[in-house]
Amino acid sequence: GGLLSAVLVALAANTSLTDADLSCHPSAAAEPAVESALVAVLVGNRSLQALQLHGCGLPLGAAASAVGAWERSNLTLQRLRLWRIEPAALPEAAAVAALQAEGVPPGFVPSARALATRAVAVARRNARISEAMERALGD
C-alpha cells in the first residue's frame, strides 16, 4: 500500500483522535488499499467525529462504500467530507462545475450529488444521536 492507505490503517486503530484532515494529492486514492482502509476507519474508529478526505481523487465507488459503511456502522462520526465543496448544498450548475473540477467525470456527477445528500443525512442522524446522548448523560 501507499502513504494514504497506511495513514488510514493507523487512523482506524487510533482511539483518541476526534478530527482528521487527510486531504491530499488527487492520485492518492489510486492506491489499491485505500477503499478497504477507509471502510476500516469508518467501521472501527469510535472516537473520530470529523474526517476530511477531499482532493484525493477517491473513485465514486470507494466513496459510496465509505458512506455505506458510515451509515451502517458508525454513530460517532458527524462529518465525512469527500470533496472540497459540499455538492448537496450548492445549486446544481455550481455543484456540477465544482465536482468536475475535482475530477468527477460528468456522467457521475448526479451520483456524486446523491451520495453527498446521503452523507448529509447520515451526518444529521449522528448529530441527533450525539445530542440525545449528551442530554441523557447530563441528566
Image: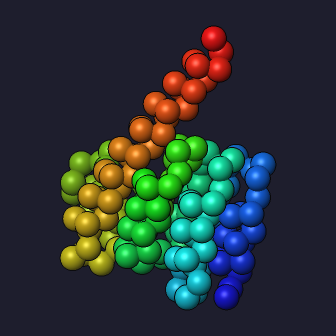
x%, y% of residue 57? 48, 76
Q: Is residue 89 left or right of residue 34?
A: left
- Residue 79: x percent and y percent? 52, 47
- Left or right of 123, for residue 38: right
Above or below residue 12? Residue 59 is below
Q: Quadrant of the C terminus?
A: top right
Q: Quadrant of the N terminus?
A: bottom right
Q: Residue at x 65, y 50 (%)?
A: 46
Q: Which residue lies at the image location 26% right of the left edge and 66% below the top edge?
A: 111
Q: Position of residue 130 (x, y in %)?
A: 55, 32
What residue is at 60 percent from the left and 74 percent from the top? 37
Q: Which residue is at the front of the view, 89 or 76?
A: 76
Quadrant for residue 42, please give it: bottom right
Q: Is residue 129 left or right of residue 5?
A: left
**Between 109 and 132, which is closer to the camera in this rendering?**
132
The answer to whether residue 101 shows anywhere in this view is: no
**Residue 118 drawn above or below residue 134:** below
Q: How many marks?
A: 0
How is this picture coloured?
Answer: rainbow
Q: Is residue 40 left or right of residue 81?
A: right
Q: Position of residue 85 (x, y in %)?
A: 43, 55
| Residue for point 43% across, 53% down | 71
Query: Can residue 138 be spotted in the picture?
Result: yes
